[in-house]
Amino acid sequence: MVDTCQLRFARADYDRLHAHLFPGDNDEHGAVLLAGITEKEGQPTFLVREVHLAMEGSDYVEGKVGYRALHPSFIHKMITRARDEKLAYLAAHNHHSDLSVGFSRIDLDSHELGYPALMQIARGIPVGALVFGERSIQSDVWLKDGTRLGLDHATIIGESVETLYPSSKPYEEIGDEAYERQLRMFGVEGQKRLSKCHVAILGLGGIGSLVAELLSRLGVGRFTLIDDDVVEVSNLSRIVGADRIDAEKALRKIDVAERVILQANLSAIVTKLEGDIAIESNAKTLAHVDYIFLAADSMRARLVFNAVVHQYLVPGVQLGSKVRSTEEGGLLDVMSANRPVRPGSGCLWCNGLIDITALAKETKTDEERKEQAYGVEEPNPSVITLNAIAAAHAVNDFLLDFLGLRSESESIHYEHFHHLSRKRMLVEPRKDEICPECSSKEGRFARGDGFGLPTLEG
Ligand SMILES: [Zn+2]
Ligand SMILES: [Zn+2]
């Protein structure tokens, strides 16, 4: 099998499946996963939306050919549901192996025997199998054109971001002296993961430019930058790497950020996207990155970011800083915020962080706003030190979570720094049981390309 696919799970779904497959009895167990699909350059990524555990004795029974098999009526129920929901059908079972796993000859024979008929019922949606080791996964997914897909890798997204392969590959040495000191903390494997990692930064103003600086110094290898603004003199107090000449030339903020990134890491690959984050083509590129930093402070950006995280199972963080004053200008609160957003841990809607009134206001042009007496708002205060605290904490979380460096898996918390009172507050995000944006029982979750994003054209 030359062609490959990818697989993404929310952590809670993977853990539930893993516990079912490996209860400690050294036996074989089964399940069916239904998954949304997103495609890039012909390679599909399957986004696990539903996990249906096969019950011993009724759904998972003695096989005619192999040792055990899914019961035909269970398969029928699942394939019909997959077809109706337009989700890929993936039958899962386990083998007793650890860091590498593959299908047996009997497994492959049974796919060849059974899948042509399932493909007929599925009417064009992909059908296939996954086999799990303790810490490895392989796939044999059939597409309607006859292609069969092995697994490139699977990502499990929760408080940490774990990557599993059909078999783990040894990492070669890294020759670059530039990383010598940080290697001592996260090792050759960690450095390699960073160099292969693709991050998106939404907004390259005060906070986003700091995020770009920090990530590129760490050795992150790929960046997608989205911003439609140019540098002005009034930005120079905050934008890393920008100077007076940039402001005079009205250089784009994404160009300044690219320069900063390449200064730190010449081999970084940078994709620059102009225009609003909410333009559909911009939003869709986010489905294929490994991590999203939302450093743009508009409600529309929050709306799109939040949708992408849950629809495509991409981990991200919303970060910002805020200064609140009294009418007379006295300071009430000076705050930096670092809010990780992960599938399964609530969303910006559940937590009241998307304000519908502000959202409606943003969709009007400045002209309309004047007419309707909303008024064009004064710019908010913005100070580099406040931005730096948010940026450093968000990038640090990315580093620890993405490389799996925390000793225990900590649950997700929003981090709020109230600087006047010197307080750091940890807030557990709310998670509504039935939320159309983030609940796995409702609308958007893991739907992939088959579902609309709340974009400007959409
Ligand atoms: Zn098997
Ligand atoms: Zn929600």
Image: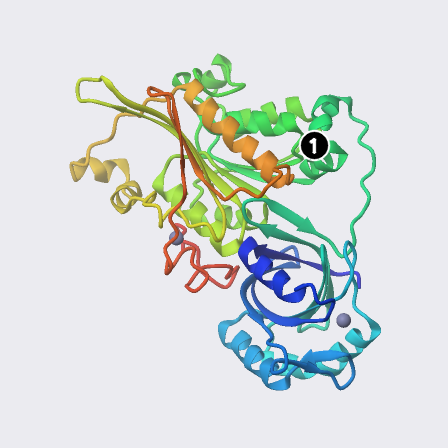
**How many numbered tags mark residues here?**
1
**Left or right of 51 in this view: 455:** left
**Left or right of 208 in this view: 269:** right
At x 52% / y 71%, what residue is drawn? 86
Residue 182 position (above or below residue 67)? above
Of residue 296 and residue 90, the one placed in the foreground of this image is 90
Q: Position of residue 154 (x, y in %)?
A: 66, 54
- Amino acid type of disc 1? Phe
Q: Residue furthest top?
A: 244
Q: Position of residue 92 (x, y in %)?
A: 66, 69
At x 48% / y 39%, what residue is drawn? 317
Of residue 57 and residue 364, the one placed in the foreground of this image is 57
Residue 173: quarter of image: top right
Image quarter in which the N terminus is found: bottom right
Q: Is residue 436 visible?
A: yes
Residue located beneath label 1 in the image: 186
Secondary structure beneath dot 1 equals helix
Residue 367 position (above or below residue 143)? above
Q: Position of residue 78 (x, y in %)?
A: 56, 77
At x 67% / y 82%, what residue is drawn? 61
Of residue 320 and residue 54, the one placed in the foreground of this image is 54
At x 73% / y 26%, what residue is drawn? 184
Q: Residue furthest front?
A: 25
Q: Quadrant of ligand 1?
A: bottom right
Residue 166: quarter of image: bottom right
